[in-house]
Amino acid sequence: MKRTPFHAKHVQAGAKLIEFAGFEMPVQYASGIVQEHRAVRSTVGVFDVSHMGEFEVRGRDAATFLQQMTVNDIRKLEQGKAQYSAILYEDGGIVDDLLVYHCGDFYMLVVNAANIAKDYDWLQSHLSGDVKLEDASDRTALLAVQGPKSLETLQPLCSIDLGSLAYYRFQTGTVAGVPMMISRTGYTGELGFELYFEADETKAAAVWDAIFESGKRFGIAPVGLGARDTLRLEMGFCLYGNDIDQTTNPFEAGLGWITKMDKGDFVGRQALVRVQEDGVKRKLVGFTLPEKTLARHGYALKDGGTVVGTVTSGTFSPVLQRGIGMGYVTRDLATPGRTVGVDIRGKDVPATIVKVPFIRPS
């Protein structure tokens, strides 16, 4: 297994380490998933997400290439901004969801860790014109500092004014004296920042230690993959491999808002035209369960005893103190307030379909 530059810090913090996407990653620390989750919602938490993939796209035709390969409109992406998008197969299925950063003379794509090789091969197979694609994943460290106190934690260490950094924008600067790209996107719904810098253990340790020293007054906490999942699910954010994959298209997954059908041709567009003409057959919805009942990925969703869909993600919400989940149901059932059954060990437990996000972050 690969290790991130922060591995020693995870061991020092008593992390429980597991294999994830080929990396040895912390799933939780001594305090546990619920306490890590609450730290992010109430104060500040730090995630090592160095396992994520970063590609650099350069060349005279880079923008044209990305306009063809992604569903969002690259023409509207200005330098210093980030854009949420997706890559599709010809049949409209999702290769991956990703972030695209306009870095001036090149674009940076941030892709899911488990999809690095697949995404790279897919993009490489479609290269044309003056375009160079480079996988910068192994030389890039990435920390996410998330929570209401993230700005106050980072600002004393940072060379730029974080208060003026708008949502989905980024700047270059330093944190703890280390040069990096500082962005403001996030996967938790809270105020937060992402720090991209050279994957060097000495620099990683310096940045980690400085952040935790600065955030000590707020009760800063390291956060693992477990709480990362519960936090994103409370916000209704999709997870590739669960809620979206090659069998799902953007319209049924609720990603029509990033899919710009009027921008011109792109890979998968013709299939999506047919989806629009025929209408989606199913939709991704959120649902709540009674108290501490948990629905798991793969559980059947039913209506009157008939299977009408599948749970894609499920967890216990520390904020709502009840089970929440997402899953696909037939279009006629995808209405807030409707009740469906979740087959939990042979018993149909009633679940109420609700709008996402499940909570409003602080």
Image: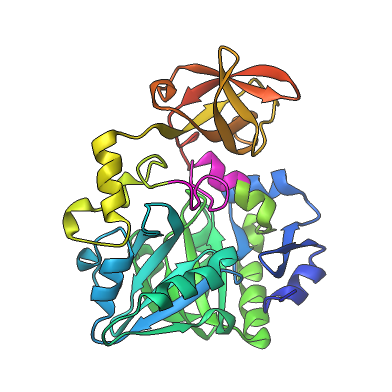
- Residue 147 in the image: state x and y as whole percent: 53, 53
Q: Is residue 74 magenta?
A: no
The segment highlighted magenta reads: 230-248
Q: Residue at x 65, y 49 (%)?
A: 227
Choose between 27 and 97: the one closer to the eye: 97
Choose between 313 and 36: the one closer to the eye: 313
Task: Tell me if residue 297 comes above or below residue 294 in the rendering.
Answer: below
Colour approach in the figure: rainbow
Q: Is residue 233 visible from the viewing direction of this image?
A: yes
- Residue 55 in the image: state x and y as whole percent: 45, 77
Q: Is residue 231 magenta?
A: yes
Judged by its main secondary structure, the magenta piece is loop
The residue sitting at the top extreme is: 304
Q: Residue at x 22, y 52 (%)?
A: 261
Q: Quadrant of the N terminus?
A: bottom right
Choose between 64 and 265: the one closer to the eye: 265
The total of numbered circles placed on residues is 0
Q: Residue at x 59, y 82 (%)?
A: 138
Quadrant of the rendered structure where residue 67 is?
A: bottom left
Q: Is residue 155 visible from the viewing direction of this image?
A: no
Judge from the rendering whether residue 283 lies leftward or rightward of residue 42; answer left or right. Answer: left
Q: Residue at x 38, y 71 (%)?
A: 161
